[in-house]
Image: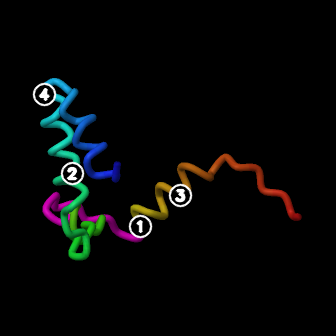
Amino acid sequence: MSIDPSILDKVRLFPPEKQQEVADFIEFLSRDRSQSPRKPRLKGLCADLGVQITADDIDAVRHEAWGGFPREDV
């Protein structure tokens, strides 16, 4: 018995909802993945929020986060 009939025999034993799951999975596996959609860039995701972060804002946050960090000459 080749693999194709054995798979078909096993699938026939499943209830209809499980058979549909198998069919959906086969469809998923057969999709062409060569042209997958591009992943969105973080900058593009935030562009419509209208948030403008300046270098001064970044410096202020760094100072807040690291201001109490002990400074020792190493």
What secondary structure is found at the residue carrying circle 3?
Answer: helix
N-terminal label among 4 and 3: 4
**Residue sitting nearer the eye, 39 or 46:** 39
N-terminal label among 2 and 4: 4
N-terminal label among 4 and 1: 4
**Residue 73 found in image quarter:** bottom right
Residue at mark 1: 56
Q: Amino acid at mark 3?
A: Arg
What is the spatial separation of the Cα atoms under label 2 and label 3, in whole angstroms? 51 Å
Q: Amino acid at mark 2?
A: Ile
Q: Are marks 2 and 3 in contact (CB under 8 Å)?
A: no
- Neighbor class of circle 1 (other Cα within 10 Å; few <14, some 14-19, many 20+) is few
Query: From which residue to which does the magenta span run?
Result: 47-55
What is the spatial separation of the Cα atoms under label 4 and label 1, in whole angstroms? 59 Å
**Residue sitting nearer the eye, 55 or 2:** 2
Q: Position of residue 3 (x, y in %)?
A: 34, 51
